[in-house]
């Protein structure tokens, strides 16, 4: 199955892509460093051609409140629209355990907004909520 991993070059993406390939999937790394930008839409249509599943493990380069909200809001809208156009069958997104209980954090408000867009969208989805990774501790 062709699985496009948005943010496939990041901390979790780098771990996920080899696992998908070991399982026999055609896992495609998609991020700005490979010419695919979910925020501007650059390269999205081409990357999603023939994909069955999109896994979104991208992250905002800035954690400043307005920037992170803009990142998850715009990139999620762009991804869902491109997935609908390409006939993608499932959208998977990585979120954070308890995000809806930490709304004093701008980052968590943006993750809750990302989840809401996915739930309101037309693409069947799975939202995976993980606790913070140990690598992120520092
Ligand atoms: N870290 C944690 O503890 C943790 C816990 C739970 C959930 N999560 C969630 O897991 C996801 C991934 O986190 P992470 O720590 O693996 O992130 P990360 O290491 O910061 O990686 C970010 C990834 O996003 C890509 N990216 C940045 N701007 C993009 C854009 N405009 N379009 C497409 N891709 C873009 C980067 O691509 P380039 O390499 O090309 O710049 C990179 O591949 C996030 O949504 C986060 O909320 C993280």
Image (tube, rainbow, N blue to C red):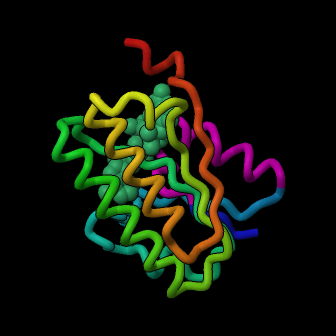
Magenta region includes residue 32: no
Q: Which residues are magenta?
A: 5-23
Q: Splitting the image into 4 quarters, where does residue 36 fall?
A: bottom left
Give 91 or 51, whichever is nearer the viewer.
Answer: 91
Query: Does 13 appear above or below 50?
Result: above
Q: Is residue 84 visible?
A: yes
Ligand 1 quadrant in view: top left
Kindly tell me whether residue 32 is visible in this rendering: no
Q: Is residue 83 above or below residue 103?
A: below
Placement of 99 over or under 50, stated as above or below: above
What main secondary structure does the magenta stretch of the protein show? helix
Q: Is residue 7 magenta?
A: yes
Please state the horizontal and vertical placement of residue 88, each as a whole percent of the image: 62, 77
Q: Nearer the viewer, residue 133 or 77?
A: 77
- Residue 38 at x, y percent in the picture: 36, 64
Q: In the picture, residue 64 is in which quadrant?
A: top left
The residue sitting at 41% across, 54% down in the picture is 114
Measuring 28% from the left and 53% from the top, which residue is drawn there?
71
């Amino acid at each position: 199955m062709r699985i496009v991993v948005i943010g496939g070059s990041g901390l979790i993406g780098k771990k996920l892509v080899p696992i998908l390939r070991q399982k026999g999937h055609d896992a495609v790394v998609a991020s700005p460093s490979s010419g695919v930008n979910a925020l501007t839409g650059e390269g999205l249509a081409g990357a999603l051609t023939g994909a069955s599943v999109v896994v979104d493990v991208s992250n905002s380069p800035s954690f400043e409140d307005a920037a992170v909200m803009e990142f998850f809001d715009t990139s999620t809208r762009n991804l869902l629209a491109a997935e609908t156009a390409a006939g993608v069958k499932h959208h998977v997104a990585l979120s954070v355990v308890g995000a809806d209980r930490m709304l004093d954090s701008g980052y968590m408000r943006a993750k809750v907004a990302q989840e809401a867009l996915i739930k309101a969208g037309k693409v069947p989805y799975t939202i995976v909520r993980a606790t913070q990774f140990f690598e992120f501790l520092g």
